[in-house]
Amino acid sequence: MKKLWIIIGTISIILMVIILLIVFVPKPQALDYTSFSKNYNYLENEGDIEIDFPIFYSEKENILIQKENVNDSLLTSKDESIIVPLNIESITYQEAIVLKGKTFYKYLYKFTFKAKELNDYTILIPDAYLKIIYKDTKALKLHLGSFSYYQEESFNTSNNDLRLTYLKGIVNEINGEKRVVAIDLKIANNTNKTLVLKSMNIYDQNINVSHSLIKEIDYDLASNELISNVIDNYNYREIDTSSYSLDLEPYEEKHLIIPLGYKDDVVANEFAFRIDYLKDEEENSYYLGKFLFFEETRYTENELAKMIVYRYDHSS
């Protein structure tokens, strides 16, 4: 009988310890993470690029920010029919920020990839995702926006025919979001020949130049000038594919407003562009590398409304 009570007492103690562990030992908490969709665009001539993606976490210290825990990193389309392997270079803490009443911690992920190894000179992913696979086989996946990569062998080569003497973006707020509605530039002919400008191309799959609305002006504009004050009938969602031609006489400079049309509502604050022109009836191109048209200093109500919060469950 005494032995039975000892057994019962032992079992009771074990059960009590288990209950205490269940009640008082902290359980692994689910980790929230998010990012903001934007247009990521790149123009290179060698196929080696660095790309930065910010990710916001609900915990400052967590296992997902430890580079040694990462097994693989991929840039993919939504259905993963397009997969671009990435090399993760660094993960750097940036700042704490309150989003929808909750504190998140921003980390900047720096990746590299070699497009030449993929034999791809253009990579266009309209609906791009970042997928990070960890050594415990769990994966983080989040929407980035759109991704546009272009490789031009003649980019960065010397071209002294044309010269930009002035460049800025005309930025308007449309539907609560900043948008580059036009490029404001002065372009000069450095040669003793007449050059014929034929087209202007943006290196982003979602942005096009509205060639029929390009306007020559002789006055300066503020960077926040309402585009409707300069260009009649402008609509940022209209894509114009009409032809274009403008003569630049020898050593002449012209001041142009170049309106832009957008295929979607994703914000792009920087991009590269190309000007195609004729010299002695021979086709040439002038490239401008990625240019920052405005700083992203805050997240708008529209961006916050579209913010998707994902959950990484440590225990699952």
Image: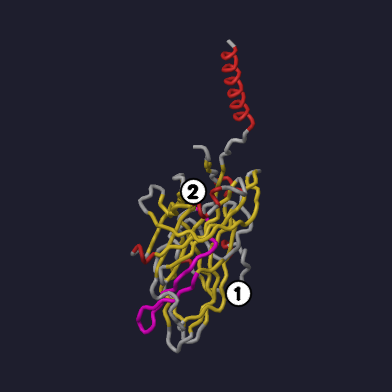
Where is residue 234? Give x, y as percent.
Answer: 51, 60
Q: Which residue is mark 1?
A: 219
Q: Nearer the viewer, residue 3 or 216?
A: 3
Residue at 63 percent of width and 44 percent of height:
100
Main SS, magenta residues: strand
Residue at 56 percent of width and 42 percent of height:
31
Q: Nearer the viewer, mark 1 or mark 2?
A: 2
Residue 89, label in figure: none
One can see residue 278 in this view:
yes
The mark nearer the N terminus, 1 or 2, is 2
Residue 137, by quadrant, is: top left
As drawn, the residue found furthest toward the left would be 119
One can see residue 211 in this view:
no
Where is residue 22? Give x, y as percent.
Answer: 59, 29
Kind of residue at disc 2: Leu
Q: Which residue is mark 2?
A: 142
Is residue 268 on the magenta stretch? yes
Q: Dot 2 surroundings within 10 Å: few (below 14), some, or many (20 or more)?
A: many
Is residue 62 on the magenta stretch? no
Kind of residue at disc 1: Tyr
* Relative to 230, residue 282 above or below: below
Q: CA distance from mark 1 to mark 2?
A: 45 Å
Q: Secondary structure at mark 1?
A: loop
Task: Tell me where the magenta segment starts and ends, as one range.
Answer: 265-289
